[in-house]
Amino acid sequence: MPDLVLFQPDIPQNTGTILRTAACLGIAVHLIEPAGFPLSDSALKRAGMDYLERAALVRHLTFEAFDEWRNAGQRRLVLLTTKSAEPYADFSFRASDLLLLGRESAGVPDTVHERADTRLTIPMANGMRSLNVAISAAIVLGEALRQTGGFPAAG
């Protein structure tokens, strides 16, 4: 099933919300360091609540370490960005995809953009700049899970 990847997140509440979403949907979250906040349970607790203990969090010390890991597993890197014209809903997701979300303050650097296998966007109304990263993660992850049959069984 697709995994979420956070590139050097800035806001602990967003990371906590993403970890809670991932725990509820049974997927892993890869966090590429450094984060813009201490990676402690207390920093993530408010948004993640008691779901954090059920979240599958994998930490990568650098983007290079993460990229080496993903290349070894031959996993496709799907960057969610406002700098794309390809709508996420027109894309054919695979169960092994890694959905990469950038920093809330700056996205990802050009070097990371270049390493992505594809870049997708969420269409928005004219004049709107971006959605919250946790909302973006949920929107695109929902479509990826729908396409790949990856939602957990009910019950």
Image (tube, grey):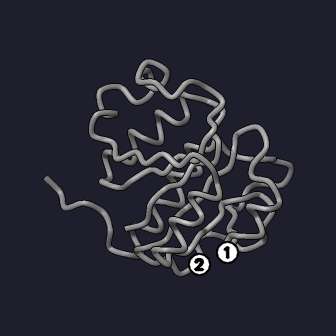
Q: Residue 48: percent from the left, percent from the top?
A: 40, 30
* Mark 2: amino acid: Phe
Q: Secondary structure at mark 2?
A: loop
For mark 1, what is the residue?
118
Q: Residue at x 28, y 34 (%)?
A: 53
Q: Which quadrant of the view contains residue 67?
A: bottom right
Three-letter amino acid code at the position of disc 1 = Thr
Residue 60 left/right relative to 85: left
Which mark is on residue 91? 2
**Which residue sits furthest bottom?**
92
Task: Tell me if label 1 and label 2 are in contact, CB under 8 Å.
Answer: yes
Callout 1 environment at 10 Å: few (<14), some (14 to 19), or many (20+)?
some
Tell me the residue at 67%/75% (across/down). Answer: 118
6 vs 142, nearest the viewer: 6
Mark 1 vs mark 2, CA separation in Å:
10 Å
Write down the quadrant of residue 105 in the picture. Answer: top right
Q: Which numbered disc flags the more N-terminal residue, 1 or 2?
A: 2
Residue 18 left/right relative to 8:
left
Where 137 sits versus 123, above or below?
A: above
Question: On the rendered image, what quadrant is the N terminus found in?
Answer: bottom left
Query: Residue 131 appears at what percent x and percent y?
Result: 68, 45
Seen from the viewer's position, the closer of residues 152 and 52 is 52
